[in-house]
Image: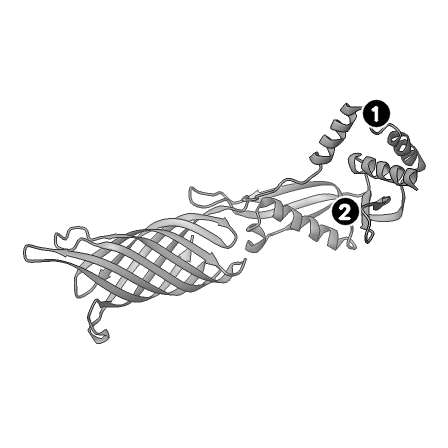
Amino acid sequence: MKLSSLFASGLMLLLASCTTTGMMHTASTLKTNSEIASLTIADLDVNPQRVTYTMVPTEDIQLGGEENVKRAAEAKLLESYDNADVLVDAQFIVSKESGSLFKKPKIKSVTVSGHPAHYKEFHSVPASVWNDAIAAVSTVGQSTNNDESRTTRHFANIPKPNFNFSGARFESYINAFGGYTVPENAKFKDGIFHVGGSLTLGCRILPQLFIGAGAAGKYVFDSEFVYIPVYGNIRFYTHNGSISPFIDAKVGHSFVPGDKMYKGGFFASPTIGYAFGRFEMGIQYTFQKCRVENHNYNSTNKEHSLSLSLGVRL
């Protein structure tokens, strides 16, 4: 029994380190540290004619990057040819629009060509491979160099972490907003109306996460001066797609150019909204500090604003 266990363990070590074309299936047995392995290979029924398929990718597919677009086109081709299993000698032609400094080139279409193939006649590995494996097992432990080489090959087969940011892209947002501002210690009925707009530049580093910075202008009617906030911006979309609710937060500092009495101050503006493709709308709350300085007194005013925001993504 000990000799049989040693032989099985050695054979498994060899199979884990050797590179063989085929599919490896493993199964664990309860209350045992050994593994049962079966090496299986299959023939391919390959279409002798090269076939071609062209796909215009949706925006959702493009969020995953160029490789994701290629895989989607390949899957569509295989599906259209009797649900083939693999595509032999796959080749791709990707057509892109011209990009800009703040906009990543958009993929217009991708054309994939190759030979669709189906798996057939699954069978076990030829006896010659097993004979070579048995012969190699008998030499296990005789050479330290062989053990080191085997260990190196084993760890080389362990997949490395893949942090794929290939779908990251530059984006910019233009928003127009208008609403009602209530100064500190004032009643709601004593509030004043305001209008404004903002421009935000940044990067969609993940399909659901945008980080950027920008500037805005806000005109308060009765005060007759303009706030210019400069801010950092982070936005999270709840769904991975072009139509999605989102949560947005802007934090920064406001300036009041050309006015000697009003000095501006801290600025914060969270927004809850909904994106419809390139368009969006939301409810925006703004907290604004403004320091007032003149020859009689110095003070800090706080304002609370509620706005309706409409925007477009460029």
Measured as percent of width and height from the top left, residue 84 is found at 78, 51
Rendering quarter of residue 152: top right
Residue 146 rendering spot, x and y as whole percentages: 78, 26
Report the residue at 20% width, 53% height from top: 256
Q: Residue at 86% across / 37% down in the picture?
A: 11
- Identify the image quadrant of residue 128: top right
Report the front residue among 281 and 239.
239
What element does badge 1 sit on? loop
Going 52% across and 47% down the picture, which residue do you hit? Answer: 106
User: What residue sits right under mark 2 in the picture?
Assistant: 86
Q: Residue furthest bottom?
A: 189
Q: Nearer the viewer, residue 207 or 143?
A: 143
Regarding mark 2 in the picture, which secondary structure is present there?
strand
Provide the residue designation for mark 1: 142
Q: Is residue 197 left or right of residue 223?
A: right
Query: Counting residues from the N terminus, which is met first, the one under dot 1 or under dot 2?
Result: 2
* Amino acid of disc 1: Gln
Location of residue 280 in the rendering, given as x and y in whole percent from the top left corner: 43, 62
**Vertical relation: 15 (above or below) 31:** above
